[in-house]
Amino acid sequence: MNDAELDRIFKALGDPTRRRILDRLRERPKQSLFEICAQLFAEDGMALSRQAITQHLDMLQKAGLVRVVWSGRTKMHSLDPGPLREAVNLWLRNHL
């Protein structure tokens, strides 16, 4: 893992909405965009646009924290904790 990948992961984790999305995906993998939007709305009572959630998911996917599989025409999102574990281990090893 290089510094750019490490930066992407920590930048992705810097936003509370993205952390909440990851929490939801940890609790229940393989969720569609619709399910993620509905769950966030149920928790807050405030709707985030599908476009906003899509942008958050894209950043999480680019950071390697979310993986996508297709089920028919629907993208299903799941947490991939591997890159996060690797980033934390690398960062701690280099900074302790």
Image: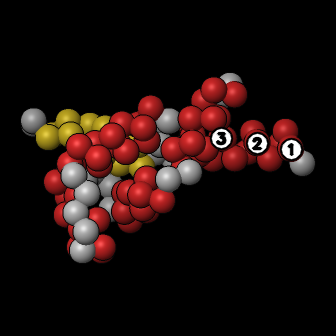
Task: State which quadrant residue 3 falls in.
Answer: top right
- Please tell me whether mark 1 or mark 3 is closer to you in this view: 1
Three-letter code for the amino acid on which mark 3 is drawn: Glu
* Label 1, residues with CA under 10 Å away: few <14, some 14-19, many ≥20: few
Q: Position of residue 10 (x, y in %)?
A: 61, 44
Three-letter code for the amino acid on which mark 2 is drawn: Trp
- Tell me, yes or no, whether the two marked residues, 1 and 3, touch with CB atoms within 8 Å: no
Mark 1 → mark 3, Cα distance in angstroms: 14 Å
Three-letter code for the amino acid on which mark 1 is drawn: His
- Name above or below for residue 1 compared with residue 83: above
In the drawing, does residue 46 fall left or right of residue 7? left
User: What is the number of callouts on the image?
Assistant: 3
Task: State which quadrant residue 74 falls in.
Answer: top left
Question: What residue is shown with label 3?
Answer: 86
Question: What residue is shown with label 1?
Answer: 95
Could you tell me if residue 59 is visible in this image? yes
Q: Residue at x 36, y 36 (%)?
A: 58
Mark 1 → mark 2, Cα distance in angstroms: 6 Å
Badge 2 element? helix
